[in-house]
Amino acid sequence: MSATLAPAPAGARGAGPAPSRRQLRRTTGRLVPLVPAVVLLALFMLGPVIWSFYGSFTNAALTGPNAANPEWVGPQNYADLLGDPNFPKALWLTVLFVVASAVVGQNVLGLALAMLMRSALRPVRAVVSTLVVTAWVLPEIVAAFAAYAFFHADGSLNALLAGVGVQGPDWLFESPMLAVILANVWRGTAFSMMVYSAAVSEVPPELDEAARVDGANGMQRLVWVTIPTIRRSISTNLMLTTLQTLSVFTLIYVMTGGGPGTDSSTLPILAYQEAFKFAQVGYGTAIATVMLVIGGAFSVVYIRSLRPEVD
Amino acid sequence: MAQTVPVTPAAAGAPAAGLPVHDAGTPEPPSRRPRASLAAPGSRATRLASNLVLVVVGLCFVVPLGWIVLASLDARATLVVDVPDEVTFANFAAIATPEQTWLPLWNAFLLSGGTGLVAVVASVLAAYPLSRYRMRFNKPFLYAVLFGTCLPITAMMVPVYSLFVRLNLLDSLPGTIFFMAATSLPMAIWMTKNFMDSVPVSLEEAAWTDGASAMTALRAIVLPLMRPGLAVVFIFVFIGAWGNFFVPFVLLLSPEKQPAAVSIFAFFGQYGSVAYGQLAAFSLLYSLPAIALYVLVTRLAGSSFALAGAVKG
């Protein structure tokens, strides 16, 4: 918020009523342009969130009488959640997916690429960063097809392994989580790489130089100089990649469909399948509500860390 | 932000990050200096190693990407990345029918363009008071917007579906456009406000003195000055909507309304196990606009690094 203006463009002239009422009217006038945005956000962002909490207490179905007139069933859906072995499994798979592909995979690879780019030849740097960014710019469903073709039993990975005499497994069936985690690292690392490239370029070179003079090797300089200096970028990036990865649907849905069985059904996939495959919209909504609460909790932490930007 | 381009609210955070003009004053890119010192004797092995590692990483990244390009040109494409025996455009010719390709691409264009327009108009209007007046209302609103940026939209799709059933908006293109615009609004408002903050107020003050209303000043003075910023916001919303699969997949049911992302998935389900070449060709056609717009936006915004880089917080 940079500018503060004393005179309002309209309505400030003339004697008018008491200052407080005039001020009120002026403020109201100034808020009018916000109306379209507020209406859209209230209807399509706040609305579904409230609807999600309400709907999770009903037995809404996809078709039949319960689709038109769902009944209030109280916390039945949540009780069912606790009794459903697929729910804790999906929760665990979601945590595994987020930690392995975002927190570890994308962040470590992104930081490593950002550091390596600094000492790389210009053409190598240009080509590799273009490839990494392309995987990120592609529409998600195309990236999912590419990853599907790569990890398929008859795909590129097994063809490469066969080239060195190794008989590769059917990745999508035997280790679906490994496949989708690696696919998400492939797809999402560009974001972390760009964040860290920018952060690393702002580290004062004197710091690095001083550590070098003191005899620190590359690893020590990374751990004791670079990482502490860019720690704010790291925490911001961790939060953002976590939130993005929490809601990955298309990649997993195309590659494995959540299967085999429910072996790669993270929470978004489980909510979708319960609601649209098994027609239990109320139950799916309960899963969605759990996800919203988790996402909301992460968002609050993230916003607190960004507070100086708003204030 | 589920499938939108994962640009952060802080992407346009530092006002300088948005417009390349601001970088002109920097004496020297700071990244140059450490590289010079790494060239010191003794680090030759380090440099060789980092180049080698990067080449290996690049190879890992290129294989899945290369499959799309090579398979689309191969009459007998399989799932394995392979240079075609003879280059053919038969796959492109086979899918170049209105119902297979052109209509879904047109639908995707309508959906993304509509989403981008609604989002830009709403966020310009909203950003003006947020940027120009200091009101008690600003801070809670901006916090709410920031919170909205983070909410997992994927998690909302089941309740959104039942809400759309209630509102009788299911299978409606305008309904889907307004929903997608609303979900991209938090990011769009945030970026637009930051771009607007970097337009000096003094010019408007002159206009106000001459009796122009706030909206006149916005239209005649502020908007022309932030045209590149508006283009950046529009393109980001457009790319996000263009690549979004899940939202239209849930909300648009009739095939003649579905955008390319959904129809390509239907194609994959029907012929995916036989017509790999056509699937790759369709994927390539569908990806090109997103890639071209991304290149354009990096030009407009200085560089991709500048855009994502402002996350430094």
Image (tube, coloured by chain):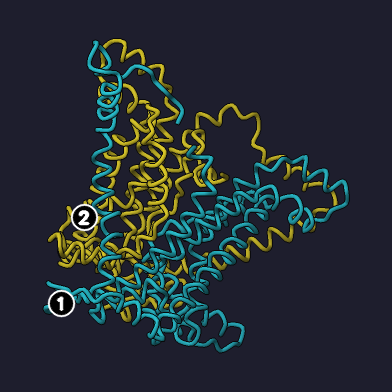
Chain colours: A cyan, B yellow
Give the x, y percent position of residue B67.
44, 69
Cα gap from disc 1 to disc 2, whole angstroms: 37 Å
Q: Quadrant of the N terminus of chain B?
A: bottom left
Which residue has dot 1 on it? A66
Q: Amino acid at mark 1?
A: Asn
| Contact? badges 1 and 2 (CB < 8 Å) | no
The image position of residue A128, as x and y in percent, is: 57, 57
Q: Tell me the quarter of the image containing the C terminus of chain B.
A: top right
Q: Chain of mark 2?
A: B
In the rendered view, tell whether residue B306 sits above or below residue B260. above
Which residue is painted at 75% across and 50% down in the image? A225
Left or right of A220 in this view: A189: left
**Which numbered circle lies on residue B106?**
2
Q: Does residue A22 appear in this view?
A: yes
Q: Amino acid at mark 2?
A: Trp
Given residues A265 and A297, the one toward you in this image is A297
Both marks 1 and 2 on one chain = no
**Can you tell which quarter of the image residue B133 is in?**
top left
Identify the residue at image location x=16%, y=63%: B170
* A15 is higher (above) or lower (below) than A295: above
Vertical arrangement, residue B24 with respect to residue A227, above or below: above
Q: Position of residue A2 (x, y in %)?
A: 46, 28
**What percent of the width, then of the height, locates residue A201?**
65, 44
Q: Would you place residue A256 above or below residue B9 in this image?
A: below
